[in-house]
Image (spheres, helix red, strand yellow):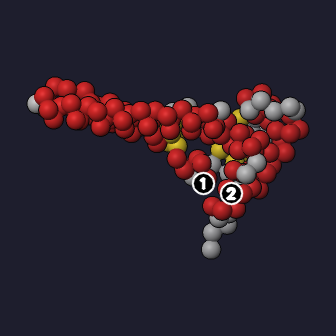
Amino acid sequence: MSDEPAEDVLERRVGGEYATLRVYLFLLKVGVASVRDVYRGAGLSSPSLALHHLEKLEELKLVRKDENGVYHVIARKFGVIRFFHKTGRWLLPRSFFYMILYAAIAVTSAFLLSSGMRDVAIIISAIGFTTSLIDTVLFLRLID
């Protein structure tokens, strides 16, 4: 049996607490950080509060502390985080990629389809693009 906490435990103990989730999201973006880095980067009120959340994440096996006291993130997908993809230092919602897909369909349709089909494809793509844009903005607001 695995020592890792189940997804529902992670969702309850991390996703249910905004400050802990904020610390984990910060670590997902930077990968490695000290207590002071987390205190500043996650916008917490004190280094001791940052340490509290880091110890909680370490207990849940979401971070690993090295011999120098630096914390390394262990990426896991749970709760709202499962709707995001990490690309470099960015956490992008899945809906962002759908938005790009709909834009590409609209542009391609404008050049390759006949007049009647082009209009339908562009309208459907515009609806998809707009809903994906709204979802992307809402998801980004959720984690910032």
Q: In the structure shown, which secondary structural element does the residue marked by tag 1 occupy?
A: loop
Which class describes the residues within 10 Å of circle 2: few (<14), some (14-19), or many (20+)? many
Residue with the most extreme left position: 114
Query: Where does residue 14 sit, x and y in percent of width and height?
Result: 72, 51
Q: Residue at x 86, y 39 (%)?
A: 49
Q: Please give left or right for residue 109 compared with residue 114 in the image.
A: right
Q: Is residue 76 visible?
A: no
Q: Are marks 2 and 1 in contact (CB under 8 Å)?
A: yes
Instruction: Tell me the element at label 2.
Output: helix
**Which of the two residues, 70 or 101, is positioned nearer the viewer here?**
101
* Sequence order check, earlier mark of 2 and 1: 2
Give residue 78's mark: 1
The three-letter code of the residue at mark 1 reads Phe
Q: Position of residue 137 (x, y in %)?
A: 54, 32
Q: Determine which quarter of the picture holds residue 23.
A: top right
Quadrant, the N terminus = bottom right
Horizontal side of residue 108 vs 89, given as left or right: left
Q: Amino acid at mark 2?
A: Leu
User: Mark 2 highlights which residue?
Assistant: 10
- Which residue does the image show at 65% across and 32% down from the upper left? 144
